[in-house]
Image (cartoon, grey):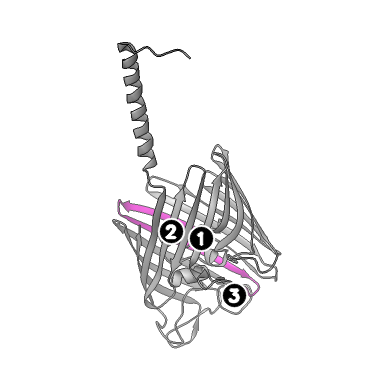
């Protein structure tokens, strides 16, 4: 090795190298100080009142869809999500407390006394820029709507969402195919059995996506569901969401339906949206609640969404019109239509 001569030129090079290394170290230290853990979630509550039916007692009616169906002032849930995002690996722990969370993970607990608070619990590995493995419990990939009230535009939920799967536990692989194409393959416990597998059978899922449009498939012990979820920005202020699904159960029952979600942004802090949904049962599936075979329902939900900082206020009018008597009026007489009002408040952090 050549001996370093102590000259002014060498001293200058050493000084320059020291400055460069110090600058590089400072950059690396600054990058390492970026938070790797994150804490997020929501808190929501609401008020609900029927306009053509009783609001308490045996004659109280509510739509057959999930979550926002309790009378008067009611609680949604507190949702707390702890996550770590590394360069290659990470995890998500998603806990829910309250009626909405309990309804979302209705198939738990199977094992632990605290099983009914785990909404999602998974680890992931970015094998490459184009391939990610996820292992654990995650919310379903089917459908337009989700469990989180902050991620949905309408506060009450659709029939399609309510009777599709909520969550899966298993292993999935996501592929970025390039040019806005994506794909996913999964092997899972039976649908909504999230803590362990008590049956010894497995469900299989697949997804093909292109530029925000997704075709989803689920096969589960003789049952089969195909689902399309997507949407289009018609203009800068007008968005149209779309969901359609067909489910064939293993017991000669099932459902089919479609929903449109037009949303118009009228200002920086207010958006008006409509959900129009048609849902039909095959056989006596039980979703609409008529007790008759092949019942259907057409539901219109008009929702306003106003943001005040991290707080979202959602007033909502909903009309459910069934093909058969699915509801009760204030006197307890069967009726086909139910109209209701909801005012929800959601804080997202």
Of labels 3 and 2, earlier in sequence is 2
The secondary structure making up most of the magenta span is strand
Position of residue 11 relative to residue 84, above or below, is: above
On the picture, is 228 further left or further right than 264? right
Look at mark 3 in the image and give the residue it sits on: 286
Q: Examine the rendering and report whether any part of residue 312 can be seen.
A: yes
**Percent from the top left, x then y, of residue 272?**
36, 58
Q: Is 20 left, or right, of 208 in this rendering?
A: left
Residue for point 47% across, 45% down: 86
Residue under pointer 2: 81
Residue mark closest to the camera, 3 vs 1: 1
| Label 2 with label 1: CB-CB less than 8 Å | yes
Residue depicted at 57% across the width and 78% down the height: 290
Magenta region: which residues?
A: 260-286
Left-right relation of 283 to 134: right
Q: Quadrant of the C terminus?
A: bottom left
């Amino acid at each position: 090795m050549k001996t370093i001569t102590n000259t002014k030129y060498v001293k200058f090079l050493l000084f320059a190298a020291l400055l460069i290394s110090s600058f590089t170290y400072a950059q690396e230290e600054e990058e390492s100080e970026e938070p790797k853990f994150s804490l997020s979630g929501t808190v929501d509550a609401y008020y609900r009142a029927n306009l053509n039916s009783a609001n308490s007692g045996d004659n109280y009616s509510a739509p057959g869809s999930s979550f926002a169906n309790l009378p008067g002032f009611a609680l949604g849930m507190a949702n707390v999500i702890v996550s770590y995002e590394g360069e290659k690996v990470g995890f998500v722990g998603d806990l829910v407390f309250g009626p909405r969370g309990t309804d979302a993970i209705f198939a738990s607990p199977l094992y632990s006394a605290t099983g009914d608070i785990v909404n999602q619990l998974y680890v992931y590995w970015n094998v490459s820029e184009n391939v990610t493995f996820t292992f654990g419990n995650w919310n379903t990939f089917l459908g337009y709507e989700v469990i989180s009230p902050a991620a949905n535009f309408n506060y009450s939920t659709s029939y399609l969402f309510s009777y599709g799967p909520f969550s899966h536990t298993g292993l999935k692989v996501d592929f970025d195919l390039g040019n806005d194409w994506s794909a996913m393959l999964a092997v899972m416990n039976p649908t909504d059995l999230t803590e362990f597998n008590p049956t010894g059978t497995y469900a299989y899922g697949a997804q093909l996506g292109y530029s925000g449009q997704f075709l989803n498939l689920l096969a589960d012990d003789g049952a089969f569901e195909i689902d399309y979820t997507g949407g289009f920005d018609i203009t800068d202020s007008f968005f149209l969401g779309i969901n359609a699904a067909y489910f064939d159960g293993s017991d000669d029952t099932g459902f089919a339906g479609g929903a449109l979600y037009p949303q118009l942004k009228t200002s920086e802090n207010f958006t008006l949206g409509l959900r129009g949904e048609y849902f039909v049962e095959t056989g006596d599936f039980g979703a609409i609640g008529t007790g008759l075979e092949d019942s259907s329902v057409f539901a219109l939900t008009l929702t306003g969404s106003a943001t005040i900082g991290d707080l979202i206020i959602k007033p909502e009018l909903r009309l459910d019109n069934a093909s058969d008597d699915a509801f009760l009026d204030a006197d307890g007489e069967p009726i086909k239509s139910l109209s209701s009002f909801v005012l929800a408040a959601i804080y997202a952090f």
